[in-house]
């Protein structure tokens, strides 16, 4: 089955996540032309205005040549390009007509006669060859899942060189085996499930699931200045594939080309990889809203993890992928009940995460809040990472490589687990 048959409709380019990633700066440039001031600046000195944008040479050339077909091939979207066309004084009909090989008069005349019939053969249509055949070689797969708390004070302890102080020493000692394991198991890509903590998203936009499709992600300033850690490098092509597959599987993700990442994402990277000049692998952020209710259920998160596994397995490149779940364990950061810790509940959560994830996924939010504290709800994100491992009900098995638990780090019970996957790989053809 060819999931992207839309690419073979003649004379047509469907604007998907891949095109969007390719045309991001081009389309953002077009958006800049929605103010009179910018339009005037563009018309006054076109080249200088374009030079201020990080466009590829092909994109710059397409604009200077007024070649909308080339701009679309380069990731431009017609609604964005229309802002550019409007700046040049073009109507939608003039723009559309300019792509057909007809003169303006011929195109207008064709429309007056009733428009182009759906079955018409386009003699000048160029079929996109690039995606014609799905390569039959090795595919990507999820080799391990890693789970860890993401307390900001842990990052601060590293950044301020306090890891050997008596308070912090036992926390970092618990991650020593992890550092060793991570050196021996550097993946190509980590899909890092975390929640943004009012850093990238304020209350003007509250998306439930956000996939980072950009090429890089800057470190957010959470009020103390950005952490002194490397920028995070993404994988736009793989992320676009995941977006396509997950949305096709009815998970309506929000896609973020620009996403400053906060402690939820950087503290796990620091804990696992230590102090580095560059992170050793690419990272695709997957943000989950757990700040403003309603937040997604454990069952929804687990199902998303399952779908993520299938989406990874259908990517026709041999990538070694890890999925990390972050946040938790028990903690409450607010109100008279702040400081709540529940060791028994946390221990049972870890056991069930390994042995009975589908059962654990049925636990309602209220249990998390009552038993693990209001911010303990972050643990639902761990179910996404667990769902991305092979299915125990389907003969799959996982190995517990490492487990660690410690109270406290700041207000939180630190929990950590590494599971590697030995189960039968879910093939791309498998359906739920
Ligand atoms: C703390 C823990 C968190 O998970 C978080 O996001 C912020 C603070 C804490 O324990 O201080
Ligand atoms: Fe948190």
Image: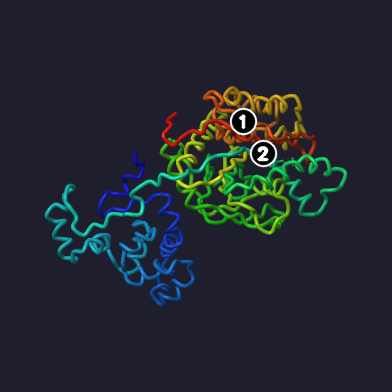
Q: Nearer the viewer, residue 321 or 149?
A: 321
Give x and y (percent) for residue 310.
48, 36
Give the residue furthest to the right. 166
Where disc 2 sits, the SS reads loop
Specify the label residue 398 is tagged with.
1
Q: Quadrant of the C terminus?
A: top left
Residue at left offset 25%, top offset 52% = 10
Q: Quadrant of the N terminus?
A: top left
Please tell me how crowded label 1 is: few (under 14), some (14-19), or many (20+) other residues with Cα within 10 Å: many
In the depicted structure, whether residue 280 falls above or below residue 412: below
Residue at left offset 37%, top offset 51% = 15
Disc 2: residue Cβ within 8 A of ligand 2's nearest atom: yes
Q: Which residue is mark 2?
A: 327
> Is residue 295 among the parts visible in the rendering?
no
Give x and y (percent) for residue 34.
41, 62
Residue at left offset 35%, top offset 59% = 73
The answer for how far apart the CA atoms under marks 1 and 2 are is 21 Å
In front: label 1 or label 2 = 1
Give x and y (percent) for residue 228.
71, 58
Give x and y (percent) for residue 315.
46, 44
Q: Nearer the viewer, residue 300 or 388?
A: 388
């Amino acid at each position: 089955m060819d999931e992207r048959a839309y690419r073979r409709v003649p004379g047509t380019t469907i604007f998907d996540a891949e095109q969007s990633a390719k045309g991001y700066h081009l389309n953002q440039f077009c958006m800049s032309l929605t103010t009179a001031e910018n339009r005037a600046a563009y018309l006054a000195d076109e080249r200088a205005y374009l030079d201020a944008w990080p466009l590829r040479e092909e994109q710059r050339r397409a604009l200077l040549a007024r070649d909308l077909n080339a701009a679309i091939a380069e990731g431009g979207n017609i609604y964005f390009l229309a802002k550019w066309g409007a700046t040049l004084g073009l109507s939608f009909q003039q723009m559309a007509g300019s792509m057909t090989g007809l003169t303006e008069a011929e195109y207008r005349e064709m429309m007056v006669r009733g428009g182009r019939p759906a079955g018409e053969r386009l003699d000048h249509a160029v079929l996109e060859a690039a995606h014609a055949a799905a390569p039959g070689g090795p595919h990507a797969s999820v080799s391990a899942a890693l789970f860890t708390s993401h307390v900001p004070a842990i990052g601060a302890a590293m950044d301020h060189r306090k890891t050997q102080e008596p308070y912090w020493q036992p926390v970092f000692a618990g991650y020593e085996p992890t550092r060793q394991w991570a050196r021996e198991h550097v993946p190509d890509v980590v899909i890092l499930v975390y929640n943004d903590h009012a850093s990238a998203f304020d209350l003007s936009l509250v998306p439930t699931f956000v996939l980072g499709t950009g090429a890089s992600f800057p470190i957010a300033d959470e009020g103390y200045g950005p952490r002194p850690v490397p920028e995070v490098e993404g994988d736009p092509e793989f992320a676009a594939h995941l977006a396509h597959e997950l949305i096709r599987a009815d998970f309506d993700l929000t896609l973020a080309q620009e996403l400053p990442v906060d402690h939820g994402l950087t503290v796990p990277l620091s804990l696992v990889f230590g102090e580095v000049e560059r992170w050793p692998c690419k990272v695709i952020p997957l943000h989950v809203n757990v700040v403003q209710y309603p937040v997604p259920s454990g069952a929804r998160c687990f199902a998303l993890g399952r779908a993520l596994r299938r989406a990874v397995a259908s990517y026709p490149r041999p990538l070694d992928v890890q999925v990390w779940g972050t946040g938790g364990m028990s903690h409450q950061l607010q109100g008279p009940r702040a400081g709540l810790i529940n060791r028994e509940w946390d221990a049972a959560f870890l056991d069930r995460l390994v042995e009975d994830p589908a059962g654990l996924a049925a636990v309602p939010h209220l249990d998390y809040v009552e038993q693990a504290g209001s911010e303990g709800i972050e643990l639902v994100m761990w179910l996404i990472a667990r769902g991305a491992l092979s299915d125990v009900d389907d003969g799959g098995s996982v190995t517990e490589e490492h487990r660690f638990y410690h109270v406290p780090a700041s207000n939180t019970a630190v929990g950590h687990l590494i599971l590697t996957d030995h189960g039968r790989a879910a093939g791309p053809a498998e359906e739920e």
